Amino acid sequence: MTPLTLPLDLPLEFDVSRVHLTDEQFYQLCISNPDIPFERTAKGVLLIMPPVGGESGSREIEFGGELYVWNRQTKLGKAFSSSTIFKLPGGGSRSPDAAWVELSRWQALTPEQRQKFPPIAPDFVIELRSRTDRLKVLQEKMLEYIESGVRLGWMFDPQNQQVAIYRPGEEIEVRELPTELSGEEVLPGFILQVDRFTD
């Protein structure tokens, strides 16, 4: 198969239906352009995700690290970094800043499905708004997660010193920072202490 590549001056988003990318072509596009982080919305809009700055990157690894340590101790599932793209049931191909999938659900996937973009909605996701993220776009992404089957999501908004908690069938809960977050029944025993973000 001929690799798919794109010019570096591509706009930040365009309608993927214009180029008619199949799931396999989207996968090949990502593999052929490893330095360009792509996502695809449920509506078929292809996104190029900009890199994050130092503060966002530090928080991202901190939160993901806490999730990894909890999972290593409990062995209840699989934790994933921001480089993982999940092919969501709703049609989007998304890459949370951190994610977790319950073990039996992960094991139900075939080896090939695990090797490529897993066709599964994580049970839990974390998104951290960077200075280049538009709040409305990130909020839509969180709703897409929940509509695809994500059971718990945390969206951190350093600019407003808040965290929004997303749960299926419930109103979005917004908390001011600092706060203590619980993984609830999704991540039993997982507690994350979150301080105010610094500039």
Image (cartoon, rainbow, N blue to C red):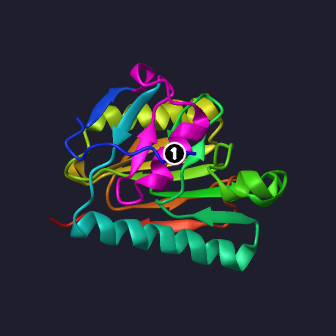
**Counting other residues with Cα less than 10 Å from the Cα at mark 1, is it few (<14), some (14-19), or many (20 or more)?**
few
Magenta-tinted stretch:
16-43
Vertical comparison of 190 with 27: above or below: below
* Towards the viewer: 199 or 22: 22
Q: Is residue 12 visible?
A: yes
Please tell me which residue is depicted at 60% across the width and 39% down the height of the picture: 24
| Relative to 178, 150 lies left or right | right
* Towards the viewer: 82 or 12: 12
> Where residue 8 sits: x, y (%)?
23, 47
Please tell me which residue is depicted at 58% across the width and 73% down the height of the picture: 68
| Mark 1 residue type | Thr
Please tell me which residue is depicted at 63% across the width and 74% down the height of the picture: 70
* Towards the viewer: 8 or 192: 8
Vertical comparison of 106 with 41: above or below: below
Vertical comparison of 164 with 100: above or below: above
- The residue carrying mark 1 is 2
